[in-house]
Amino acid sequence: MGRTLEITPVTVTATANGDHTMEKQTTDVEGNSSQVKRRHATSNLEAATHLFKGSVGAGLFAMGDCFKNGGLAGATILLPIIAVMCVHCERMLIRGSVLAVERTPGATFFDYPETVEKCFEYGPRPLRRMSRIMKLIVEMFLCVTQFGFCAIYFVFITENLHQVLQQNGVDISMSMVMLITLLPAMIPSLMTNLKYISPVSAFANVALLFGLIATLSIAFSDGPMPAVGDRNLFTSGSQLSLFFGTALFSYEGIALILPLRNSMRQPENFSSRFGVLNSTMFFTTGLFIFTGFVSYVRWGEDVAGSITLNLVVEDVLSQVVKVVAALGVFLGYPIQFFVMMKILWPPLKRSNSCAQKYPISMQVVLRFFMVMMTFGVALVVPQLNLFISLIGALCSTCLAFVIPVLIDFVVRAQVPKGLGHWSYAKNLLILAVALLGIVTGTYQSIVEIIREFK
């Protein structure tokens, strides 16, 4: 879900599946970065808390569907493997960023797109011309991912509210419910200053945590749990491709890694053996497995794209949980949208004279248009689980696996004999898994979406 973490010397806007915006550290008048003040830098615990908040969101509620597509045993085995791959790729990104900062005079911090640009810029001569293109590709994937998150939020909110309204005698269509949510989502999204919308993030986190705890409590208390033997332990290839997309969507937090590391008092503790990154990912993976296992055992093949949709709507507590969870997601929409606008607006402003002359008015127009775009996509692709799998397979896989591997190849190529047999084999294996996930996951998600249309 959308989160705002305001940290000095770095201001970070973070999201559940790796989304962020950041303002760089300031240096002194001589440009000496060693004199950067870190009075309000974060501790290890604070950084771990922020990383956890940025990793747990809509994907957590989709873990039941993830286990349905992966099988009880298959998903339990594969999720830790995916987590290890994600952490390894995040470490490669950190290494590339640190080396790029060291080679750039006066630089104190590079975010994800800038790291990619600088690594290619300092890389082998034939690749240097690709630096700007690679930065644009990363920005595009980040933007598409954020756009997908915003559209998914509309679907999540609509499905939960529609069930509650139907139960209470309000007989309106899903499309009408989504239209009702458009105006409340539009108003805060038109604000161009983050400080006016960031306070809702804390309440959104509380609402989501309440929704998860209450949902799992209801799952355990709703009669005896079905036998584990009644559920699939493993699944077929087509379902595994959907599992891969959902898992990557849930783990996508790689864009948050660099800002959080840079905000710490002791950045070296972020990626140490028992540091922030490893500890947080270990806890997050355990939570994913527990939530997915319990949800799939309880609801089986009927588990929905969000486990809140499986709650008995006649029960008052279930209705409260649905509304609170929907509210938590709804309050995160403006934050997610803000991140997307931070990517789209600067290049548009630089290239458009009208945007330079009337920046506020043109940005409001752009925001209105993009909100309507996310609303339109959510309206025509109503299946939450398929949407999550598509975004995860296509964009999250590239950001989490493909780009970090390319960075590692470029960085190692700058050092004599830096690319050993182990590096080649390991990186090619990650690329093979990533490309397989992209092709099969994207194809299967599109097929299932087309089938829903028919």
Image (tube, rainbow, N blue to C red):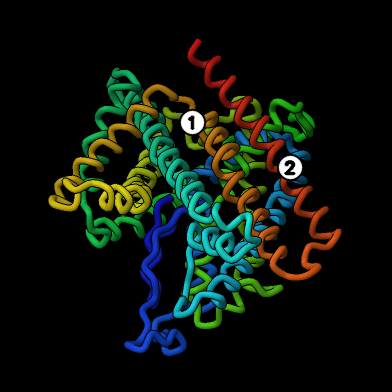
In the rendered image, the vertical position of residue 437 relative to residue 204, given as above or below: above
Instruction: Tell me the residue at 61%/46% (across/down).
Output: 291
Q: Quadrant of residue 100?
A: bottom right
Q: Going by the picture, which residue comes out furthest to the top?
A: 454
Q: Going by the picture, which residue comes out furthest to the front?
A: 125
Q: Badge 1: how crowded within 10 Å, few (<14), some, or many (20+)?
A: many
User: Which three-letter amino acid code belongs to the residue tagged 1?
Assistant: Leu
For the residues marked 1 and 2, what is the alpha-carbon distance in whole angstroms?
A: 25 Å
Q: Is residue 209 left or right of residue 30?
A: right
> Pointer 2: what residue?
433
Please name whichever residue, 323 or 414, is drawn nearer the observer in this view of the structure. Answer: 414
Instruction: Tell me the residue at 65%/54% (across/down).
Output: 406
Task: Between label 1 and label 2, give the one nearer the viewer.
Answer: 2
Locate residue 142, reporting x and y percent.
Answer: 47, 48
Residue 206 appearing in the image: no
Q: Which mark is residue 384?
A: 1
In the rendered image, the vertical position of residue 332 relative to residue 34, given as above or below: above
Q: Quadrant of residue 448?
A: top right
Instruction: Tell me the residue at 74%/30% (across/down).
Output: 231
Locate residue 69, reporting x and y percent.
Answer: 67, 31
Locate residue 432, reporting x and y percent.
Answer: 75, 42
Please name whichever residue, 316 or 344, is drawn nearer the observer in this view of the structure. Answer: 344
Q: Earlier in the sequence, mark 1 or mark 2?
A: 1
Locate residue 304, reporting x and y percent.
Answer: 54, 30
Q: Is residue 210 left or right of residue 125?
A: left
User: Which three-letter amino acid code belongs to the residue tagged 2?
Assistant: Val
Q: Secondary structure at mark 2?
A: helix
